[in-house]
Amino acid sequence: MQTIGERLEEARKRKGISIREAAEATKIRGDYLHKYENNQFDIKLPEIYVRGFLRTYAQYLKLPGDKIINDYHALGLGDAARNSRSLNREVYGRMDISIANARAAGENPAPTSTTATPPHPGGDTVPDDNNPATFRPRAPGGFNFDTNLLIKGGALVVGVIVLTVLLIWGIGALTSNKPDEPAITWVKPQPGERTIGLVGVSATELVSATDATGTILFSGPLKAGEIRAIPRNSAITIQTETPQTVKVELAGRQWELTDPRTGQFVKRSTIQAP
């Protein structure tokens, strides 16, 4: 049976999508997606974001999100795998039960005697905190604290504060993440070498230039007005999906990537060796 990561990776490759393209489409960092595909779910974020990102990525790849999350929980991960416990209220009371047993002595048993609570001036019984029948509230100005309730209340307050801090940190981490910068390969010419320039007419996502041996001389984006000079020691093949956004600078002149016979833009052009 395939793991979660294997299913994600297989679905992505089946669609011909790179990690970078998936990250741009889902707005999820590429390193998080890479970890998911390697069954590494500890991305240092609160559990709610781990599950949310996993579901979003699965749905983006046209996989059943609920099934993926259920399999994730089946691994013993996440809050759903932990048993929830309800907080029961406890009622504490004090009760003293005194049982006096009298035994008969001799032939004539002596009557059982009990010691009465000394009367309080005014005819009332003296209050006793340990006897619920005679317990009375203390005089105004005193304070009665239930230690157990204080401990529970303090723990609840601390838990709320910690949860709030984690949520703020998680939101800040998400909003501060920037998309992965595209990798750039650039072989710069040496002094005295013949060169050819790649000129950005407008912003271009990807342009690649290789020599006759297949060596990549340049691969990456071009900004509008940007020029990247590369060595021209053999035939140079230039390839881009948007040829109208790129020109070639050669011998002080700039040339469009067009077919000389039809004048139409072509995605693949070859500049012959000097």
Image: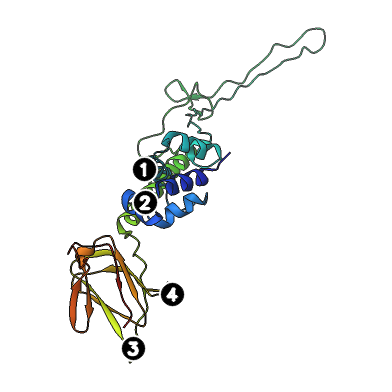
> Disc 3 and disc 2: Cα gap in Å?
40 Å
Q: Amino acid at mark 1?
A: Tyr
Marks 3 and 2: which is nearer the front? 3
Q: Nearer the viewer, residue 258 or 167?
A: 258
The number of discs equals: 4
Q: Position of residue 59 (x, y in %)?
A: 38, 40
Is the residue 170 above or below the residue 139 in the image? below
At a point 68% along the width and 13% down the height, the residue shown is 112
C-alpha gap between disc 1 and disc 2 = 8 Å
Which residue is pictured at 26% across the width and 78% down the height?
197
On residue 274, the disc is: none
| First-in-chain label (3 vs 4) | 3
What secondary structure is marked by label 3? Answer: loop
Find the residue positioned furthest to the right.
Answer: 106
Q: Residues within 10 Å of mark 4 (few under 14, many from 20)?
A: few
**Residues at marks 4 and 2, CA–CA distance in whole angstroms:** 32 Å
- Cα separation between marks 3 and 4: 17 Å
Q: Residue furthest front?
A: 261
Residue at which label 1 appears: 60
- Residues packed near mark 3 inside 10 Å, few (<14), some (14 to 19) or many (20 plus): few
Mark 4 / mark 2, whichever is N-terminal: 2
Question: Circle 4 sits on which residue?
Answer: 213
Q: Amino acid at mark 3?
A: Glu
Identify the disc placed on residue 193.
3
Which one is closest to the eye, mark 4 or mark 2?
4
Q: Of circles 1 and 3, which is in front?
A: 3
Q: Is residue 157 above or below residue 89?
A: below
* Image side of residue 12 versus residue 4, left or right: left
Which mark is in front, 3 or 4?
Answer: 4
Residue 151 lies, in percent from the top left, at 47, 42
